[in-house]
Image (tube, rainbow, N blue to C red):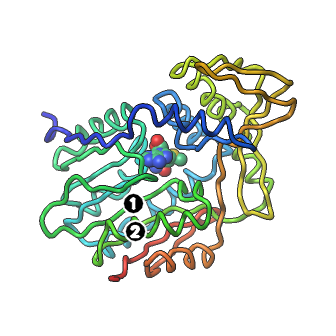
Amino acid sequence: MSGPAVRFYDYFPPSDSFRLEVLEGLSSSPKRIAPKFFYDTRGSQLFEAICSLPEYYLTRAETEILTVRAREISDLIGPGCLLIELGSGGSHKVRLLLEALQPAAYLPMDISRDHLLRAARRLSAEYPWLEVHATCIDYSRKLDLPYCPNGARKIAFFPGSSIGNFEPEDTVAFLRNVAQMLQANGALLIGVDLKKDAKILHAAYNDSRGVTAQFNLNLLARINREMEGRFILDDFEHSAFYNETQGRIEMHLTSHRQQTVQVGAQRFGFARGETVHTENSYKYGLDEFQDLARRAGFRPVRAWSDSQGLFSVHYLNAESR
Ligand SMILES: C[S@@+](CC[C@H](N)C(=O)[O-])C[C@H]1O[C@@H](n2cnc3c(N)ncnc32)[C@H](O)[C@@H]1O
């Protein structure tokens, strides 16, 4: 028999938010589109494929940390919490914690509605004792909690180094919202990619099978599907590089030639070599990230890294304000 039904809360932004933000981003100079729009159902599937690529060390390193530290993490958190996962995707990494942690309920939050629902149903079938409250939300806009069992400690789990997609100043503002949602007794368990040799970073975002390129180009395919766009995917190329000064990987879609592309009723001109900036992925030293977290109202308690020193997981207490 399967477990309790998954409760579903839809806080998805209005359907025109993708359209409006894309039109605004293509009209700006330089052109840019936020990485949250990678994740339609196809984008979420491609991201899952990226996670098992040999070059994509992030998932392996974070999985190692969570596996080795599951008991220690559970002792810090204690049983019976409300476990809120931000950007839960396929809800894979949380499985490393559930048995040891025994939360009162699990609340996965993600922008990719169908992927979220499927993942929540799979998890619920696998862990019939667990209450699952799936919430479709754009966490960069608001962070509303639809449910919390009485008196449960609120713990946010934010793996995958998605925090690196925010600009450093926006990181502080976002973490402040998280701290506010968690309240004084809460805590945040967050995966943060570390600064490292640019060659390792370059390989991770330019895999030899071209899956990351497909993931990036899917954004144009999504615009074609959902906004009557006329992008010819072969006219654009994935490019990703480490910007050492900024401490971030940048992903772009580069136009091979001068061209005009119709999107709905609008037309956008591209010079040869012009790019649409689609993602930043900031990398942080341990202290550098803890300083940002402190500014947002968290007290660093523990930080772990994997055996190769590639990735970090921080445990931070939300301070009372
Ligand atoms: C880099 S993936 C990480 C997935 C998974 N947590 C992991 O660690 O492998 C980012 C996830 O966050 C979700 N996401 C991205 N931006 C979001 C936003 N603004 N609001 C809610 N979810 C978002 C995506 O749909 C995706 O599942």
Q: Does 100 appear above or below 281?
A: below
**Amino acid identity at mark 2:** Leu
For label 1, the residue is 157
Please state the total of marks drawn on the protein image: 2
Position of residue 303 in the picture relative to residue 177 (left or right): right
The part of the image, by quadrant, that contains residue 218 is top right
* Left or right: 149, with 31 as reference point: left
Amino acid at the residue labelled 1:
Phe
Foreground pick, 49 / 181: 181
The answer to whether the beta carbon of the residue marked 2 is less than 8 Å from any atom of ligand 1 is no
Q: Of helix, strand and loop, which one carries label 2?
A: strand
Q: Are marks 2 and 1 in contact (CB under 8 Å)?
A: yes
Q: Residue visible at 55% across and 50% down? A: 59
Q: Disc 1 beta carbon < 8 A from ligand 1?
A: no
Instruction: Provide residue 4's location: percent of width, then percent of height.
Output: 13, 41
Per the image, the residue denoted by label 2 is 188
Residue lying at 54% horizontally and 59% vertically, measured from the top left: 163
Q: Residues within 10 Å of mark 1 (few under 14, many from 20)?
A: many
> Between 230 and 281, which is closer to the camera in this rendering?
230
Identify which residue is drawn at 63% across, 51% down: 57
Query: x%, y% of residue 11?
Result: 31, 43
Quadrant (top left, top right, bottom left, bottom right) of the N terminus: top left
Q: Percent x, y for residue 49?
A: 56, 34
